[in-house]
Image (cartoon, helix red, strand yellow):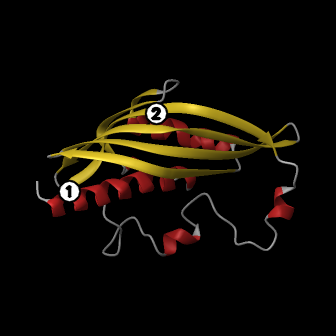
Amino acid sequence: MDQLDVLWSEREIRIVLQRYCRGLDRLDAELLKSAYHEDAHDDRGVIRGNAHAFVDQILPILRQAYTGTLHTLHGSTIEIDGDTAGVETYCTAYHYLERDGVKRVEQYAGRYVDRFERRDGAWKIARRLVLNEWNLVQEVPLDPAEAQAGFNPSLRDRTDASYQVLPLNGPDAPTL
């Protein structure tokens, strides 16, 4: 494997990681599933099994329980060996909810420990283990409508402005 292939593979893997987060936050099953091979396994401790089944299970929960989510990626360590790669990525997830008249933000910090495989030229997650470092739940004293007044809204579906510049399919689609 030459250096250019290593660099390109790292780029492709990072795109998949970003697509995963975007799919979660936009509640986009097709986009989220595109980060995984069809036979991929996802293990979060509380949910384990086929990754595509995980997507079908988690999106209704996120849609129903939270007003908004934001999944962020931090540093990734990527080690490539031919058509397989070991990847560890630090991540933080923020979930906003209102329950019983109390507004809260749940924050989760952890790591994705992934086995990526390149099949038919495409890097995707084959196995994922999610490790939890810590959680934090905080009450939000501000009314979110007041705090967000004047800002452009973020939408949790394909009507979000990002879909105007980042189509999933077609000639201008990002690399899948």
Residue 53 falls left or right of residue 141? left
Instruction: Residue at 40%, 48% (x, y): give it.
Output: 76
Nearer the observer, 160 or 18? 18
Instruction: Residue at 88%, 49% (x, y): give it.
Output: 141
Give residue 130's mark.
2
Mark 2 and mark 1 lie on one chain; the one further toward the N terminus is 1
Q: Nearer the viewer, mark 2 or mark 1?
A: 1
Q: Is residue 115 above or below residue 75?
A: above
Instruction: Residue at 47%, 41% (x, y): give it.
Output: 55
Residue 11 falls left or right of residue 54? left
Give residue 64's mark.
none
Nearer the observer, 136 or 94? 136
Instruction: Residue at 58%, 67% (x, y): give it.
Output: 159
Q: Is residue 112 above or below residue 70?
A: above
Tell me the amino acid under the disc marked 2: Val
Tell me the amino acid under the disc marked 1: Val
Residue 29 visible in image: no
Residue 126 falls left or right of residue 31? left
Q: Label 1 belongs to which residue? A: 6
Q: Quadrant of residue 153?
A: bottom right
User: What crowding class fits label 2: few (fewer than 14 Cα within 10 Å), some (14-19), or many (20 or more)?
Assistant: some
Residue 119 falls left or right of residue 30? left
Location of residue 158 in the rendering, given as x and y in whole percent from the top left corner: 54, 63
- Number of callouts: 2
Look at the image and tell me in which quarter the C terminus lies: bottom left
Location of residue 2 in the rendering, given as x and y in whole percent from the top left corner: 11, 58
Q: Quadrant of residue 100?
A: top right
Location of residue 162 in the rendering, given as x and y in whole percent from the top left corner: 53, 69
